[in-house]
Image (spheres, coloured by chain):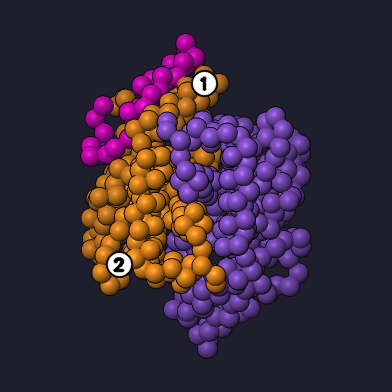
Chain colours: A orange, B purple
Amino acid sequence: MEKADRKTRLAVVSAMLTGNPGRVYSLKVFCDMFGAAKSTMSEDISILRGIFKKYGRGDIEVALGAGGGVKFVPAPTAQQKEEILKEIAGLLSDPSRILPGGYIYTVDVFSNPQYVTAMGDILASMFTRANPDFVATVETKGIALGFSVARALGKPLVIARRDHKITEGSVVTINYLTGSSRRMVTMSMSKRAVSAGQKALLVDDFIAGGGTVHALCEMMKEFSITVVGIGTAIVTRQPEKKQVDNYRALLVLEEVDTAAERIVIHPA
Amino acid sequence: MEKADRKTRLAVVSAMLTGNPGRVYSLKVFCDMFGAAKSTMSEDISILRGIFKKYGRGDIEVALGAGGGVKFVPAPTAQQKEEILKEIAGLLSDPSRILPGGYIYTVDVFSNPQYVTAMGDILASMFTRANPDFVATVETKGIALGFSVARALGKPLVIARRDHKITEGSVVTINYLTGSSRRMVTMSMSKRAVSAGQKALLVDDFIAGGGTVHALCEMMKEFSITVVGIGTAIVTRQPEKKQVDNYRALLVLEEVDTAAERIVIHPA
C-alpha cells in the first residue's frame, strides 16, 4: 500500500484503537499497513496519546519490547463522568418509573447502548489496575453492562445463570437466599468458562442487600478464583449493611417514596 | 479552547465517531470543540470519510440541514468479514466442544468481546438499510450479540425473558414449543420497552428449528411491531425447513458428528 501521511495514520489508528479497547496491537501491524518505519509509528502513537489526553478520549498504553505493542483504555474524565451520571440519574428519577413494591423500572437505561457503554467505560476505568482476567455477572438485566465493562477492558465476560442449559456444558451450581424476599435461588456457572487461580471483576446493575453479588463471590470461591473488584451501576442507601462491602457504585438510590411518588437518586 | 490542527481534529473526530456508532453529532459540537469554522469541519469529515473507506474502518453518513449531522456506521469489508468468520468457524470446529446430545459449547465465543463486536458489526451492516427502531433478542446466551448489534446501529436492545421479574413492569407473555424437545416454554417482554408501529430487528445467536425466533415474531405481532429483519450468528443445516425463513446467518453448522468427534461449520 502507498505511504500514508500523518493525518491519515492518526485517523486510522485512532479508529482502530478506540474500536477495540484492551486489544494489543503491535506497531508492526501499523508499519505494514502504512508503509511506515517503526520510529515513525512510535512518534505517531506518542502524538495520538497526547491528543487523546488533551481531548479526554482515553489512554493509550504502550508496552515495549518483544510481544509489546499499544492498547486503548477508556478513561472518562471527571467532567464526562459527572455529565453522563447526572443525565442517567435524571432519567431514573422520573416518578413514572415507580413499580409496585417500591421497585423502579430501569430496563430501558440498561439496554440503551449509549448509557450502558458510558457506564461500562467508567466502571472499567475504576478497575483497570486490578487487571482482572474476566468480568463475571448474573443474568439478565446486567448482562449488557457486564459485557460493556468486559469490552472496555478487552476481557471475556462470564455469565452466571439462574437456570442452566445443556449448552453450558458441566456447571457448578450454588443455592442462596435473595436478600429481599428470602426466596431460595439457584445460580450456575459453566466449568469451562474459567480456570482456578484467575482474577475476577464482578459487575451487577443493582446492589440492594448484596445477596446476589455475595452469592457470586461464593461461586468464585468454588472455582478458586480471586475477586479483585466489585462494581455496580446502582446501590441502594438501605439497607446500610450489605452482604458485601468492598464494592464501588456509580449511582446511589436514596429512596423510592411510593406515597409521594418520588425517586431520589444521584451520582455516588 | 485553542485552535486545533487538522491531524488533531481528524484523530479526535475519528475516536468520537468510532466509539459511538449510530450517534448523530452535529458539526457544531466539533466546531466548538476545535474553534473551527463549519466549512473546515465539513472538509474534515469528507477527508475522514475517504480515509475510513480506503482503510476499511466503516462509513460516515452525513445528513445535511437543520437537525443534520454526521454518524458512524460500521461497515466491515468483505475481506474483514471472511477473516473473522473463518477464525470463529475454526474455533467452533474444535471437537472438544461437543456436548452430550450433539450440542456444541459456544458460550466462550459469545462472551468474547472481540468476536461478539465483530459479529455484531457484520449483522448490523446487513440491516442498516432496514432502519430498525430497536433490536430484540431472547435471553441469555445471545444478549451480548444482540447488544453489540444494537450498539453498532445506535438503537436500544429489548430482551425477551424466559421468566419475568417485577422490575420489568407489566409484561406480555406468550407460550410456545421449542423445536427440539417440544417442551412448552414461556417468553415475556416488558410493555414499556416498545411501542406499536415500531420496526424490530430480531437477533439470536443460534437458529436450529427456528422455534425461538418464530415465537419472538409472534411476540412482535402482539405489540403491533413490524419485523424488518432476522439475523443469527449460527444456523444449522438441519432441519432444512425452519419455522422462519427470511433470516440471515453468519455461519452454517453443517453437522455435529458425535461418533467421529467432528464439527463442520463454515461462513455462510
| CA separation in Å, label 1 and label 2 | 48 Å
- Given residues B256 and B4, the one toward you in this image is B4
Q: Is residue A247 magenta?
A: yes
Magenta part of the protein: which range? Answer: A240-268
Q: Is residue B261 magenta?
A: no
Query: With respect to residue A254, does A84 lie above or below?
Result: below
Three-letter code, disc 2: Gly
- Can see residue A208? no
Query: With respect to residue A78, does B121 lie above or below?
Result: below
- Quarter holding the C terminus of chain B? bottom right
Whether label 1 touches label 2, CB < 8 Å? no
* Residue hosting label 1: A94
- SS of the residue at dot 1? loop
Instruction: Give the percent coordinates (x, y) of residue A200.
Output: 29, 54
Mark 1, other Cα within 10 Å: few <14 / some 14–19 / many ≥20: some
Q: Residue furthest bottom?
A: B260
Q: Residue furthest top?
A: A260
The residue at the point 26 percent across, 34 percent down is: A242
Q: Earlier in the sequence, mark 1 or mark 2?
A: 2
Instruction: Give the percent coordinates (x, y) of residue A234.
Output: 38, 33
* Residue hosting label 2: A68
